[in-house]
Image: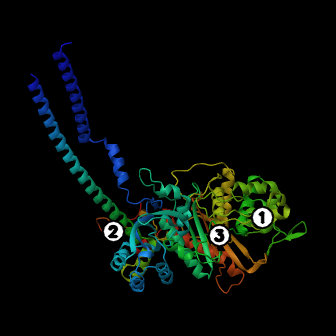
């Protein structure tokens, strides 16, 4: 090959390479200009714009219950601190307004030590931080972080629980749930893939407020030591409101940790953690299973004379030869409940109560849930059957009771209590026949219309329910005669109820503390009536055949 | 021939260099603007979040209840109950003649 053509071939090859390089540069430039597709751009922007890492908690209508706000921490490197400045710095720190919650003696000791690092305060507001920045001394610093806040204060405190700091760094601190739904859904709330995951609860802030306000009123009116209440949608199992008093402010949860007494500790959720012998409220279960087994009808006659089981005599204070089942439940007769349970038998009674969920921990989204206490199958003898038929010898939580009542009146199918908003009704396994469920509703309505709960009657709403009084158990294991819990488990409104409501007061008395005045009929029953009168409009329940007095008066 | 080809390539190279310079500059500007907007957005979101929490705090039911109690003398606000419900048919209304119209 001649030298000219060789040179030309080399040149062409070189030109080819240069051309390819230009093409590559051109493509790269084009890609710069056109950027990426809008979807990727959106994801990228969402990721980089992450303001707060933990998801919010909302009520069923989107009202904010828990969120994050910017906060700051104060920390120090004691080995850098000029020791003669400490006293003056702490004096200035104490003047900050609003005051920072600090332990002066501990901080002084920490700053005087030779440690490399100490926290002085792990949560101060941006406003406090601005003031602190003006008085900082060498070796003391502030850092940014997020803090969990509960804008409604004490409202729904036992449901929300609370949060604390997990792994703490100078400019970032992980928030972790320590109780309530904050703890149960900790992973979900901290999930941070593309965007934050918010949690929508089943509770209604309005209903929660009414229940809290009215329960507080009831506690004050009847001089009770505490109280609890739970409102549930009988078809979906959604907990619309849940209150346990005394309660606490989740923004200051740590301050309540030092309280030792469990019974009236504000952190203790009586609705899900407290197990109680719920007394006569259990009689409806005895009637329901006897109706389901076709042993009785609502109008069947049943004896209320004393009955002896294995040398143990059971009787009522007042007894009649025979009453209808309807009357016996309305007058809350122990002996009638025993006879109905005896007709059903031990095994079926046990299975029935287990089917209603009374033998296991409630499947609610809270770690603070107690396991009921019931006799073992081999100890479920005739005496146990008799006492359980009127609510003794078995301890469950008020939430168990609300769930079981819901199942009895919703047409007879199983539901699971939930704190999450449900999208629709999922019909569960059938527990009792629809006809039995209808009969149970008429028994409960009759208790309010003609029985021990007449003071719950309010105009325009159909209310049914069953009262219960349960004596407290002393430290020696015996019943305390003058100290009790009063309970009213109710369902409303209409022939096919939509809601169940359980209200319980601890050591309530309507007057001088006589036995009558310590019973449910004179304490928790009228209170429940007042609660439903307030709750009804909030829940959108239109009173039937109601003509507003104010309108009539105005027209005259 | 070789000179003219070289000149063409040289011209193209200069053109592309200028183009690259301009695009790089524009990209840097756009990135800077993007960063600025991102910071503004972040600040706005943070402000929005603070306002949301503040709103939730100021409209919390207990706070509103206390306000209605404090201002009861002026506002006469009471909590609604079943007694405040009525049928629209029970509302009196007046015809053109001025007489109250009775229900049919």
Q: Earlier in the sequence, mark 1 or mark 3?
A: 1
Question: How many angstroms separate mark 1 from mark 2 (CA)?
Answer: 66 Å
Nearest the viewer among A127 and A490 is A127
The location of residue A313, given as percent across then percent down, is 87, 70
Is residue A358 toward the left or the right of residue A133 in the image? right
Give the quarter of the figure containing the N terminus of chain A. Answer: top left
Sort mark 1 into few (<14), some (14-19) or many (20+) by Cα contacts within 10 Å: many
Return the chain for callout 3.
A
Kindly state the secondary structure of the residue where label 1 is placed.
helix
Is residue A154 toward the left or the right of residue A281 in the image? left
The residue that disc 3 covers is: A488
Nearest the viewer among A458 and A138 is A138
Judged by depth in the image, the label closer to the viewer, 1 or 3, is 1
Q: Which mark is residue B99?
A: 2
The location of residue A378, given as percent across then percent down, is 84, 58
The location of residue A421, given as percent across then percent down, is 51, 56
Q: Contact, CB < 8 Å: mark 1 with mark 2?
A: no
Say above or below: A461 vs B34.
below
The residue that disc 1 covers is: A388
Residue A459 appears in which quarter of the rendering? bottom right
Q: Which mark is residue A421?
A: none
Question: How many angstroms separate mark 3 from mark 2 (CA)?
Answer: 50 Å
Give the quarter of the figure containing the C terminus of chain A. Answer: bottom left
Sort mark 2 into few (<14), some (14-19) or many (20+) by Cα contacts within 10 Å: few
The location of residue A189, given as percent across then percent down, is 49, 57
Q: Is residue A504 visible?
A: yes
Kindly state the secondary structure of the residue where label 3 is placed.
strand
Q: Contact, CB < 8 Å: mark 1 with mark 3?
A: no
Return the chain for callout 1.
A
């Amino acid at each position: 090959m001649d030298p000219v053509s060789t040179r030309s071939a080399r040149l062409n090859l070189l030109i080819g390479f240069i051309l390819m390089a230009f093409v590559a540069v051109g493509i790269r430039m084009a890609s710069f200009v056109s950027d990426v597709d809008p979807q990727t751009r959106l994801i990228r922007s969402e990721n980089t714009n992450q303001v707060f890492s933990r998801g919010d908690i909302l009520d069923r209508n989107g009202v904010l219950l828990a969120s994050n706000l910017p906060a700051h921490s104060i920390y120090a490197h004691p080995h850098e601190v000029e020791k003669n400045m400490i006293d003056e710095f702490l004096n200035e720190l104490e003047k900050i307004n609003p005051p920072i919650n600090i332990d002066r003696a501990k901080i002084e000791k920490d700053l005087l030590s030779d440690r490399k690092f100490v926290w002085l305060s792990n949560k101060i507001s941006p406003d406090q931080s601005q003031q602190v920045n003006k008085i900082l001394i060498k070796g003391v610093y502030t850092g940014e972080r997020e803090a969990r806040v509960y804008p409604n204060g004490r409202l729904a405190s036992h449901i929300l629980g609370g949060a604390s700091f997990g792994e703490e760094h100078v400019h970032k601190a992980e928030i972790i749930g320590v109780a309530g739904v904050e703890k149960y859904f900790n992973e979900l709330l901290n999930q941070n893939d593309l965007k934050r995951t918010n949690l929508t609860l089943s509770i209604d802030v309005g209903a929660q407020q009414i229940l809290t306000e009215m329960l507080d009123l009831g506690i004050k009116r009847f001089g009770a030591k505490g109280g609890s209440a739970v409102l549930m949608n009988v078809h979906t199992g959604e907990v619309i409101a849940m209150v346990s008093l005394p309660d606490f402010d989740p923004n200051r949860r740590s301050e309540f940790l030092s309280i030792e007494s469990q019974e009236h500790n504000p952190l203790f959720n009586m609705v899900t953690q407290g197990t109680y012998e719920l007394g006569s409220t259990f009689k409806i279960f005895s009637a329901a299973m006897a109706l389901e087994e076709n042993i009785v009808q609502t109008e069947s006659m049943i004896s209320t004379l004393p009955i002896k089981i294995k040398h143990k005599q059971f009787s009522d204070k007042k007894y009649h030869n025979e009453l209808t089942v309807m009357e016996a439940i309305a007058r809350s007769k122990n002996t009638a409940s025993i006879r109905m349970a005896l007709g059903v038998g031990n095994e079926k009674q046990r299975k029935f109560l287990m089917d209603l969920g009374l033998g296991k921990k409630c499947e609610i989204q809270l770690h603070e849930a107690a396991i009921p206490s019931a006799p073992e199958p081999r100890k479920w003898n005739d005496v146990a059957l008799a006492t359980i038929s009127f609510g003794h010898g078995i301890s469950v939580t008020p939430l168990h009771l609300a769930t079981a009542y819901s199942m009895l009146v919703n047409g007879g199918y199983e539901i699971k209590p939930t704190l999450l908003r449900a999208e629709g009704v999922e019909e569960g396994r059938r527990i009792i026949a629809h006809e039995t469920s209808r009969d149970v509703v008429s028994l409960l309505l009759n208790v309010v219309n003609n029985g021990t709960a007449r003071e719950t009657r309010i105009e325009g709403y159909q209310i049914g329910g069953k009262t219960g009084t349960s004596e407290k158990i002393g430290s020696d294991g015996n019943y305390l005669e003058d100290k009790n819990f009063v309970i009213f488990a109710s369902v409303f409104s209409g022939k096919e109820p939509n809601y169940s409501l359980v209200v319980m007061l601890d050591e309530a008395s309507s007057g001088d503390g006589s036995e009558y005045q310590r019973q449910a009929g004179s304490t928790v029953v009228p209170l429940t009536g007042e609660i439903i009168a307030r709750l009804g409009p909030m829940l959108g329940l239109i009173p039937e055949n109601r003509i507003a007095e104010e309108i009539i008066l105005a027209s005259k | 021939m070789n000179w003219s080809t070289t000149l063409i390539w040289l011209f193209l190279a200069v053109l592309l260099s200028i183009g690259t310079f301009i695009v790089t500059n524009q990209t840097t500007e756009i990135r800077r603007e993007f960063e600025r907007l991102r910071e503004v957005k972040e600040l706005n979101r943070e402000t929005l979040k603070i306002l949301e929490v503040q709103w939730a705090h100021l409209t919390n039911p207990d706070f509103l209840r206390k306000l209605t109690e404090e201002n009861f003398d002026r506002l006469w606000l009471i909590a609604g109950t079943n007694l405040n419900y009525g049928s629209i048919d029970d509302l009196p209304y007046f015809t053109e003649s001025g007489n109250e119209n009775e229900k049919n």
